[in-house]
Image: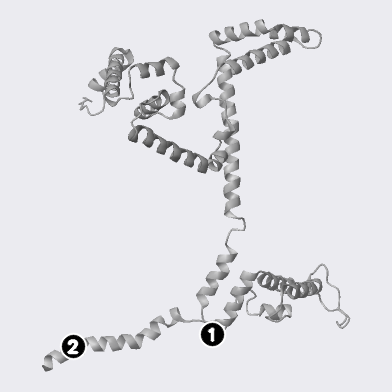
Amino acid sequence: MAVRLAGRGGPGAAGRRRWLLLAPLLLGPLLARPAEALVEGLYCGTRDCYEVLGVSRSAGKADIARAYRQLARRYHPDRYRPEPGDRPGTAPPSAEAFLLVATAYETLKDEETRKDYDYMLDHPEEYYSHYYHYYSRRLAPKVDVRVVILVSVCAISVFQYFSWWNSYNKAINYLATVPKYRIQATEIAKEQGLLKKAKEKGKAKKSKEEIRDEEENIIKNIIKSKIDIKGGYQKPQIRDLLLFQIILAPFHLCSYIAWYCRWIYNFNIKGKEYGEQERLYIIRKSMKMSQSQFDSLEDHQKETFLKRELWIKENYEVYKQEQEEELKKKLANDPRWKRYRRWMKNEGPGRLTFVDD
């Protein structure tokens, strides 16, 4: 029994007593808190902001502003005027004095900052909490985050708009060089008499180069009006910009929910047959194509999809396998693909070679 008691209270108890004696010495510097509320580096430092402005803690905003204006006129280096009671040759106040007055005013004019300062005066023991509140307000962004997001979205939208217009103009300039479209546009311009009018107007005033440029613009305008470009080079629309997409997002979400509910009710519950648009929608989803990619397909391709009834899963699987076989045949007959396969077989990666020096 004596041995067991020694085992419990001997070395273990002595170690705990030793730790309790050393703990204040080791943790004292970490747990120390200043006893005074006014700390150098926070607000007005070791000076009371109310005393700096000469107002009481119950003073209102008007009293604080009035006291600041009076002290600013007195301590500002550029507006300093000697007081009647000052001795001759008295030096003007230093810049530190005016800075202290300005700091006191900035601290007390804002309600939230003044609340933190009053709390610091009443609870000087919460040292680290005061530091956190002080620097969190000083380092907080001055601009509202919502304004930054709005400006960023607007800038991205403007960039999108001009970028899309640039792509669209490039597409029109390219189509104007394609003989098929250029000849058709020229014939339409002749039928409407646009080219003749351009030449008649420019006989006296314009040079041949200017007339040629005007005719070129007429042809491009006809191409713009007659050709509906789809895909990445289509004519930019305001509703496609990021800003309008965000604004219209709730409307699109509600429209999609309503459309999905109608789909479930009409085709899953009532068992109606799919219409042409519904069939094309199912085909597009099976092909994993976006709406713009599917719209860029030719009309005869879409008609082929409908004739083969590709909205039916079994028919689409057969069509997909046929396309894969056709692609393999094309690659097998392609000379470049043959050379690539020959290189992979003879000299491609993974082949061990021993070269004699």
Depth check, front residue: 316 or 236: 316
Snapshot quadrant of residue 194: top right
Q: Quadrant of residue 5?
A: bottom left
The mark that comes first in sequence, 1 or 2, is 2
Regarding residue 202, the answer to whether it shows in the image is: no
* Image quarter in which the N terminus is found: bottom left
Check disc 1: other Cα within 10 Å, few if <14, some if 14-19, many if 20+.
few
Number of other residues with Cα within 10 Å of mark 2, as a class: few under 14, some 14 to 19, many 20 or more = few
Is residue 198 shown left or right of residue 24? right
Q: Residue at x 59, y 28 (%)?
A: 165
Residue 158 at x, y = what percent? 61, 37
Work out whether residue 278 or residue 249 is closer to the camera in this orientation and state it. 278
Q: Residue furthest left?
A: 1
Q: In the displayed structure, does residue 320 sit left or right of residue 218?
A: left
Question: Which scheme is used to colour this image of the protein?
Answer: one colour
Q: Secondary structure at mark 1?
A: loop
- x, y (%) of residue 289? 40, 28
Residue at label 1? Answer: 35
The circle on residue 85 is none
Disc assigned to residue 8: 2
Among the 4 quarters of the image, the one containing residue 277: top left
Where residue 248 sits: x, y (%)?
A: 54, 40
Q: Position of residue 224 (x, y in %)?
A: 60, 18
**Residue type for callout 1:** Ala
Closest to the observer, 226 or 279: 279
Q: As shown in the figure, which amino acid type bears the numbered disc 2?
A: Arg
Image: 246 above or below 193: below
> Mark 2 and mark 1 in contact (Cβ < 8 Å)?
no
Asked if residue 251 shows in the view, the reply is yes
Could you give the CA–CA distance between mark 1 and mark 2, rounded to whole angstroms? Answer: 42 Å
